[in-house]
């Protein structure tokens, strides 16, 4: 089973989609089957967790078969610790997105769930592909179902938001394709063979001139930065979030945005180490990340729309993730991946909170609410946990990721950390202010007096995410253990001397005695 486990994980949602298309038109039957298909997708991904070998180098559960030999394209799958966390995030959030759609979608139910299962297949494919041709197909595949989810089941300006989302991300994808083709033909010039294999391209990329590496880096950067989205490529995101149905916003925030950060970690850094480590490039990307952190938080403080506030908070939080990546040290990169998972959990919960209240009142205007804690105590409690998780309260998940990123940023450049930490303060400010205006005080609008509190299904959607948030906040060690090996390999690729000589001892001291000894032994440095 291990030999084809990734294929099973990839194709389970697709199999569920095919059966869904054959079902009779009973809406409840379609809902039940779609939820079971998503649950099956999560269940078949669990063996990846239990059979994953922590600390093993390279990729695990690899599958490889010839696909288009004339092009050098292969069906090649595999995961490391970074992929593992993002695949599990994808399958878990897929179940929750299906569940929170139960009563929200009443029209074209079959097509709606079909789009979600297709989207699930595409997202998983992005995170497990080790062939660039295969990766690009899944990357583009994701655009189609998300376009229809926003454009058909979205809000009043859904067509504008859907087209804007599609055109922005497609433009970035075209530039990324040019970068892929550059690597592809550079490999052919050096070896005389065509290959889209990431491992093959990595061997030849180090022989490219800095000018070629820089061009490919910026081509990749545009594609990945739009998907994150980094400032100033973020303008499609608020429109997409505001107009998307609740489940669309949840899956967009929790998983789709991580495709951009994953692209930086899987492709930009390992394939283009010279360009990735260039001080000018690193400074530009760090500045853009810090601007995104502060700008996103400041814009949140000005919002009147509940959903748009949470949408702009993603710009701020993902700025932390990209800052950690381009700190180019173990703390920054590991913290970035942890924070990507954290963002999926906390922002996913916040969009679900908005969905719960929107189904009851059909307005997202913050001024329409106030004193909801008196009417909906369960809702107020869950909203408080989601808000504090996003704000980075100690013992919840957000604190672990932000603290580790700031530690990595401080190691790289103290000025970066000084500016970035203001994002933590501003984040707490806009989230607490949102909570105060909607939950605390007296009921200011008579329409809110008769709102029913959350039902069992709605509470059940939040329980696994709250448990996950507490787990990461209280005991994050398993997550850092899974990330240790791939993060070490990325850092050594970009900075070959990072774990050697004078830089080894400070790094070991931060990692702790047991882990430091292992890293020192791998690097061949002093113990």
Image (cartoon, helix red, strand yellow):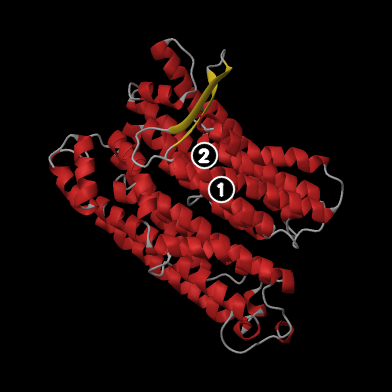
- The residue drawn where x is 49% and y is 60% is 468
Q: Where on the picture, by quarter, is residue 9?
A: top right
In this rendering, is residue 256 above or below 104?
Answer: above
Closer to us: 2 or 471: 2
- The residue drawn where x is 49% and y is 51% is 232
Closer to us: 213 or 506: 506
Disc sitting over residue 127 in the figure: 2
In this rendering, is residue 437 above or below 234?
Answer: below
Disc sitting over residue 90 in the figure: 1
Q: Is residue 501 left or right of residue 106?
A: left
In this rendering, is residue 234 above or below 53?
Answer: below
Q: Position of residue 341 (x, y in %)?
A: 47, 53
Report the number of discs. Answer: 2
Closer to us: 331 or 368: 331
Between disc 2 and disc 1, whose residue precedes?
1
Q: Is residue 261 something one can see in this rendering?
A: no
Query: Which secondary structure lies at badge 1?
Result: helix
Classify mark 2: residues with Cα within 10 Å, few (<14), some (14-19) or many (20+). many
Quarter in which the N terminus is drawn: top right
């Amino acid at each position: 089973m291990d030999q084809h486990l990734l294929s099973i994980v990839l194709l389970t949602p697709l199999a569920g989609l095919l059966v869904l298309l054959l079902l009779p038109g009973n809406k409840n039957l379609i809902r039940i089957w779609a939820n079971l298909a998503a649950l099956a997708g999560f269940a078949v991904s669990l063996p990846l967790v239990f059979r994953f070998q922590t600390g093993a180098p390279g990729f695990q559960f690899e599958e490889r078969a010839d696909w288009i030999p004339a092009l050098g394209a292969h069906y090649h799958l595999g995961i490391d610790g970074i992929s593992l966390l993002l695949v599990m995030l994808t399958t878990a959030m897929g179940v929750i997105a299906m569940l929170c759609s139960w009563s929200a979608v009443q029209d074209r139910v079959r097509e709606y769930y079909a789009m979600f299962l297709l989207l699930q297949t595409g997202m998983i494919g992005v995170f497990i592909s080790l062939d660039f041709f295969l990766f690009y197909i899944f990357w583009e595949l994701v655009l189609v179902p998300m376009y229809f989810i926003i454009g058909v089941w979205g809000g009043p300006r859904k067509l504008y938001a859907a087209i804007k989302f599609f055109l922005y991300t497609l433009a970035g994808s075209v530039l990324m394709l040019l970068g892929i083709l550059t690597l592809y033909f550079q490999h052919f010039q050096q070896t005389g063979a065509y290959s889209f294999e990431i491992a093959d391209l990595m061997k030849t990329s180090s022989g490219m001139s800095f000018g070629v590496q820089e061009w490919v880096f910026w081509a990749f950067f545009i594609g990945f930065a739009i998907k994150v989205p980094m400032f100033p490529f973020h303008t499609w995101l608020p429109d997409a979030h505001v107009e998307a149905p609740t489940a669309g916003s949840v899956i967009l925030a929790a998983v789709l945005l991580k495709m951009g950060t994953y692209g930086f970690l899987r492709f930009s850094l390992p394939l283009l180490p010279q360009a990735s480590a260039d001080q000018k490039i690193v400074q530009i990307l760090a500045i853009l990340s810090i601007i995104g952190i502060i700008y996103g938080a400041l814009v949140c403080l000005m919002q009147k729309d509940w959903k748009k506030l949470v949408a702009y908070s993603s710009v701020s939080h993902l700025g932390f993730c990209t800052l950690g990546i381009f700190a180019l040290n173990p703390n920054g990169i590991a913290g970035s991946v942890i924070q990507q998972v954290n963002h999926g959990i906390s922002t996913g919960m916040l969009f679900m909170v908005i969905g719960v209240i929107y189904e009851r009142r059909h307005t997202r205007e913050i001024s329409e609410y106030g004193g909801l804690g008196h009417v909906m105590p369960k809702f107020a409690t869950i909203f408080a946990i989601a808000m504090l998780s996003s704000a980075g309260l100690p013992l919840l998940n957000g604190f672990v990721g932000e603290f580790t990123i700031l530690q990595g940023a401080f190691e790289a450049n103290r000025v970066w950390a000084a500016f970035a930490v203001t994002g933590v303060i501003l984040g707490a400010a806009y989230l607490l202010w949102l909570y105060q205006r909607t939950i605390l005080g007296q009921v200011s609008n008579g329409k809110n007096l008769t709102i029913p509190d959350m039902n069992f299904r709605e509470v059940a959607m939040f329980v696994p995410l709250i448990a996950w948030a507490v787990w990461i906040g209280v005991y994050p060690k398993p997550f850092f253990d899974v990330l240790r090996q791939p993060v070490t390999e990325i850092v050594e690729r970009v900075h070959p001397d990072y774990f050697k000589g004078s830089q080894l001892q400070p790094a070991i001291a931060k990692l702790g005695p047991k882990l430091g000894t292992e890293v020192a032994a791998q690097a061949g440095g002093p113990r």
